[in-house]
Amino acid sequence: MSSTTKKIFLISTIVIPFLLYCFYYYGMMIKNAPYRYADFQSISMVYGPKDSLVNKFNSRTGDYQYINKRDSLVKMHVKLTDNDLLYLHHKAADLGFWDFPSNERGDTVKEKPVRYIIEFKYKTKTKRVVFDSNFQGDPKLIDANKQLIKEIDQSLTTAERRLKK
């Protein structure tokens, strides 16, 4: 057997089956991913003091209400664009939102924390996380929660500015 024949034999018996298996395995993983943007339906976020979750947003209906700096309730209809929703979906995936525990509550006896309830709805699954601002857990998890809340808030602020123009 010549060296060229040996190389061809090695490639055809080891490398090609390995590559075919990789394409099959990862193709199935991507196809069956539980949180795909193609299946995305809506984002909702409710937040405020634990006893009164007054601030609300729902991307499906576009209803948005919040307490402004003068302690008055502002209600409006805000629609996020597809690009905004795609950005938030990818940001949640980057931060590992799908792996967050669903209950991240802190001690509510000593102080009154701000509670955030963030929900991403898809056709077959829903991911809902309850996060208190005084949650005592992994600092990386707390930072990821705060970053996601900040990103959603920035998207809402941007959409609100688009309405006012």
Image (spheres, rainbow, N blue to C red):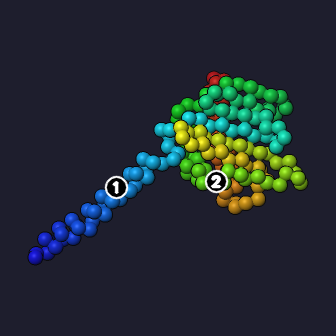
8 to 58, vertically: above or below: below
Q: Secondary structure at mark 2?
A: loop
Q: Position of residue 22 (x, y in %)?
A: 35, 59
Query: Which residue sits at x=69%, y=38%?
Result: 45
Residue assigned mark 2: 100
Residue assigned mark 1: 23
For the C terminus, which image quadrant?
top right
Q: Position of residue 136 (x, y in %)?
A: 76, 59
- Mark 2 and mark 1: Cα distance apart in space: 29 Å
Query: Which residue sits at x=82%, y=48%?
Result: 113
Query: Which residue sits at x=62%, y=45%?
Result: 127
Instruction: Give amino acid for label 2.
Output: Phe
Residue 44 visible in the displayed image: yes
Query: Which residue sits at x=59%, y=39%?
Result: 121
Q: Does 83 sit left or right of 117 as displayed?
A: left
Displayed quadrant of residue 158: top right
